[in-house]
Image (cartoon, coloured by chain):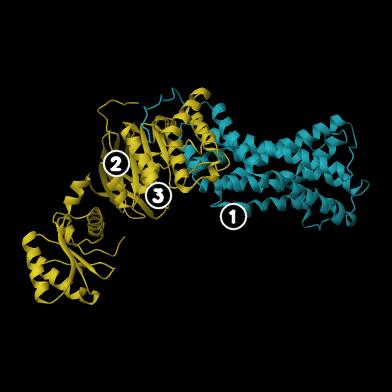
Amino acid sequence: MTTGSAAPLIEARGITVRFGKVTALDGLELTSQPGQVLAVLGPNGAGKTTFVRCLATLVQPGSGELRVRGQDVVRDAASVRKDIGLAGQFAAVEPTLTGRENLEMTARLFGHRRAAARRAAAAVIEQLDLGEVADRRSGTYSGGQRRRLDLGASLVGSPRLLLLDEPTTGLDPVSRSEVWAAVRSLAMAGTDILLTTHYLDEADQLADQVVVIDHGRAIASGTLSELKASIGQDVIEVAVSDPAQLAAAARIVSEVTSGPATPEPTGQRVTAPAPGGPGQLAEVIARLAAASIAVDEIGLRRPTLDEAFLALTGAADSTDNPPASAGQTPVGSRS
Amino acid sequence: MTTIEILNRPARAPGLLGASGQVALRALRKYIRTPGLLVMGVIQSVMFLFSFRYVFGGAIHAGSTSYVDFLVPAYVASIVLFTGGGIAVAVAEDKVAGFTDRLLSLPVPRYALVLGRTVADSTTNVWSIVSTAAFGFLFGFRLPGTWQDGLAALGLCVVYAVVFTIVFIVMGLFAPNAQAAQGMSLIAFVFAFISSAYVPATSMPGWLQPFSKYQPITPMVNAVRSLLSGSSSDVGLALVWCALLAVAFTPIAVIRYRRA
């Protein structure tokens, strides 16, 4: 097993996974360096969970190579398992055991002896702020507490790479911020983390580095600001006072920016990439005024991660749009 | 929220016995802490026993022995076929809930999953066997031979429980969810009922008798009956069946767990 400092944390070379006729991963390429939180972003069915299951040695890639700290997930599966901690989509804790019992059991299964397992469980309970509920059966926990316990169970072996598959799916906003706080504190303590999510604000909140995957392939990667910049231009956003005038406003925005304008389903807002920047904003304002369209709000802003994401995944869908024009692909059909 | 230093990493992966012990301990704690599993299992098996003994029993003629003496040894020997559905359900639930994934992502020897589960579920089956046997005595069963013969018969019943535990684990691993596991485990009823366990096989129609004669439950049940009366006929055949089932199903369980 080679764990030299030169080896990337994760290295995926053309990995393909098929389940019957379904291709879950289709030549995925990805390299990630240690010392950061990596978010794997993609719509449902993009292959995020399959990728995590490959890293966790639960699924073997049909072709390609996947390495964690230089160790092949198939040939060196046993060493990879010592390095990773997995928290899957469902909180895999035993409801009839207390939080502490769950953690001590998992610590033993990581290879800790009894006393060390007790210490590891106690440390994780403190770290994840579970002290008050640690000796209650985990079946009585709130959703957020259960997820934090599950996170803790993946941590008691002090993994070098923590794999979190949709860590906040199905949680209410309070529980969600609890889990976010826990992930941030782990990252600060020096744990490398890979998390999958289809919530863009989650990636925005937690990740240093983002990989966008769709249809089993990585379609973009980089830092968050790089990703936002990759759709290139600033965006003009107009909120009309009267929803009946939305179509007229959209037509004006579209004409000025010479590209498609996307009316939002709320029926009040329209956005469009503005390659011309402030000049085009001024023109839109003038023409809206000339057409007597009352406006609640108007402005020029950096694209959100949502827009970057939708533009990228939308572009991957249509073959007649080269990636360079991804930012101008009308979106809205996917979410 | 405080951040603390990274803990010491475990020096080595857990051994087979240690890991199996943890897997078994968790399954047993779950069983003991879920009163529904602990008590309802016994109530269910006692209800069946009661029905056979007092409802159907009067209409069944078991030759020279009284029906209660015919029924109870066979019922105890085959009790695992009735309680085994719970094993299949538990295995399927662990798979669906992601618990099996968690175990498989840990540096745990792969055999530990099957071994731990088998130890735990065999233990709960010993509980069913002993409690059902106790009710058998309460309902009028008396040992035909010595208490040593009784213990030998009980031991054989435990062997059956271990073997069928593995069979039910495999069912749970192939079932897509708990409901399906429950349904699949009903197959066991066919083997339990079309055997010499509850009625003399000779009372069945001729076309059904070959199935009864050549399936494993009949020799298993007959072996327990003969041990009780100090003989050993059918014990060899029963043990051969146990060995065959164990050898066939253990590798399936281990391989299937890896793909869970």
> Which element type, helix, strand or loop, lies under badge 3?
helix
- Image depth: mark 2 or mark 3 in front: 3
Q: CA distance from mark 3 to mark 1?
A: 33 Å
- Residue A75 image label: none
Regarding residue A277, the answer to whether it shows in the image is: yes
Disc 3 packing (10 Å; few <14; some 14–19; many ≥20) = few
Q: Is residue A211 left or right of residue A229?
A: right
- SS type, badge 1: helix
Q: Which residue is mark 3?
A: A174
Between disc 1 and disc 2, the foreground one is: 2
Look at 11% across and 70% down and name the residue there. A255
Of the pair B11 and A280, the residue shown nearer to us: A280
**Mark 1 on the same chain as mark 2:** no
Tags 2 and 3 in contact by the CB under 8 Å rule?
no
Q: Which one is nearer the viewer's eye here, B118 or A201?
A: A201
Q: CA distance from mark 2 to mark 3?
A: 23 Å
Q: From where the camera sits, is residue A276 visible?
A: no
User: Which kind of residue does numbered mark 3 sit on?
Assistant: Val
Which disc number belongs to residue B179? 1
Specify the colour of chain A. Answer: yellow
Instruction: Supply the letter of whichever chain is cyan.
Output: B
Write down the residue under mark 2: A38
C-beta proximity under 8 Å, tags 1 and 2? no
Check disc 2 and give the amino acid type.
Leu
